[in-house]
Amino acid sequence: MSSTDFAGEKFLQAVLPNYEQERFRLTLWMVAAAFAWIFVMPTLLASPAPEAAKKIIVLKKTRRDGTVAVETRTVGEGSDPLQGKTRKRLRATWTSAIGCILTLFLMLMKLSPNNYYTSRMVFQSPVFTKEECQYIIDMSQRAAQRSYESALIAPPIPVSESSPILERHSNRSLEGLLQEPIGWQKTRHYNYPTTDLNIVTDHFTVEDRTYLQNLLDRRLAPQLARIFGIPVTSIRANDMFVVRYDAGKRAHLTNHTDDGDISINILLNDEFRGGGTRFWNRILKTPFAHVQPTRVGQLLTHSALINHEGYHISQGLRMILVGFLSIDRMDPWTYQPTGMSVFSSWLSLPWMNVKFKEGYQLSMSRQSKAAAKRAEAGEPPVQSWKDHPYVKALFLDMRNLLMQTGDVLATHGVVNLVHESNATAYLRALDDHADAQQAKLAGNGKKSHSQQKASWFRGQGLNIDVDGTIDSMWASRSQNLNRYMEL
Ligand SMILES: O=C(O)CCC(=O)C(=O)O
Ligand SMILES: [Fe+2]
């Protein structure tokens, strides 16, 4: 979304990049640099300096009769003009090629807003009102109550030979629902468990989801599009959930990175002490920010690759709405392009970094599944190019290289986009714009314009491969497909 389309632009107290303009400028610079390295530099580097072209060596020989004979010999290019020139040209070509790649890489890193501006920055802005946050808390408590009731009557899942891990996990999560805080999931996230409820797979109602979807479409989608320079159609939440931290129980979340491309974290209440989110600089091994929003309904959004932690609360209950968002270049269902610029996808270090990370992880899991199948059936597995050991190693190397490049070159910091005194007016401007859009569509006789919206719930729980195709779905999705179909 360009700055002129964003309804909240005049309330921004920080200057966000004008993506379109900066990408246009960057393209011109890159074309000029490539032209210089390909056509001008090789000629300059290969052309001999006039005095260096020939070297004259004077040889003095004393003859037997005592007289001195002076002999001059020309060496270097002069003595072997063709070979010297070829060698020089070859060296110039190589130097130019390396120079060209390095220049373009540094330009991309330092002139592209998707790289220098959004890689390691945290953005803060208002997104919900206090009343809306209370409504979300209430719907979460109702969903927890329904989860508890269904867990009371659900029989334990028999552990079968074919999928013991999954079924043991399902039993553990059923048990968790019966423990305090009752009805809340305790083991949904495996490595960094939070006490949470997923908006689709837990017992929220269709009305709850519709309420949230409407709010996220009006308030969150345009802000993310503006901050990260992406179209709203490229946004697909892969996991959207409400988290609670209880003082004295699970009161913090240790340092981690998230899954997906972009993370969102919206504060729903303020009846607690401590808390906030701490963001870490991996190079310096120190936090670069500890953000404690003072206003309920405040959004924190950042690249999922930034290390962060949910800081310990010492009193009360802290609730947040969290989303792990995937930014798709292609719609995973139709394979139509989402309209995302190449500068925010394959030329964006954080985006590429995530794709290589996911590509590597998927390949590893495919490999272990294939090994299990092979053991079962005694057949050699069919291997895709993505699972070739060299490709896998390349994915891992690229992931590490891109991560470290971002860590070293990108600015780390927090941008507070809207002053607190403007929060209400800012949200009203976003609402007015959304209403006007809707009225315009209704006037055009179009009932809905769903293809122009972000996917908040319908597209969760998918593993998308580096080539944009669906690789697999999470167990929680395949077990609840009917809920995804409702939306
Ligand atoms: O508690 C927070 O602010 C961070 C939450 C978080 O990072 C997560 O749920 O992944
Ligand atoms: Fe996180």
Image (spheres, helix red, strand yellow):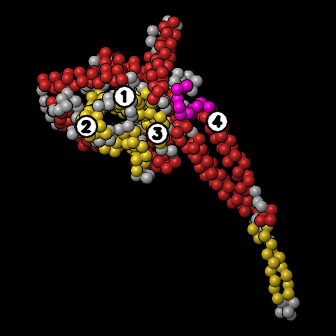
The residues tagged by marks 3 and 4 sit, at their Cα atoms, a distance apart of 26 Å
Q: Is residue 15 magenta?
A: yes
Which is nearer the N-term, disc 4 or disc 1?
Answer: 4
Q: Amino acid at mark 2?
A: Gln
Q: Is label 1 in a helix, a strand or a loop?
A: loop
The residues tagged by marks 1 and 3 sit, at their Cα atoms, a distance apart of 18 Å
Q: Residue at x 23, y 21 (%)?
A: 142
Which is nearer the N-term, disc 1 or disc 3?
Answer: 1
Residue assigned mark 1: 296
- Residue range in magenta is 10-21
Q: Is residue 408 left or right of residue 77?
A: left
In this view, the mark in front (4 or 1): 1
In this view, the mark in front (3 or 2): 2
Q: Residue at x 79, y 75 (%)?
A: 57
Q: Residue at x 72, y 48 (%)?
A: 40
The residues tagged by marks 4 and 1 sit, at their Cα atoms, a distance apart of 39 Å
Q: Residue at x 40, y 52 (%)?
A: 285
Residue assigned mark 4: 25
The residues tagged by marks 3 and 2 sit, at their Cα atoms, a distance apart of 26 Å
Residue assigned mark 3: 414
- Please state the horizontal and vertical placement of residue 64, each as a whole percent of the image: 83, 92
Q: Are marks 3 and 4 in contact (CB under 8 Å)?
A: no
Q: Amino acid at mark 4?
A: Arg
Q: Amino acid at mark 1?
A: Val
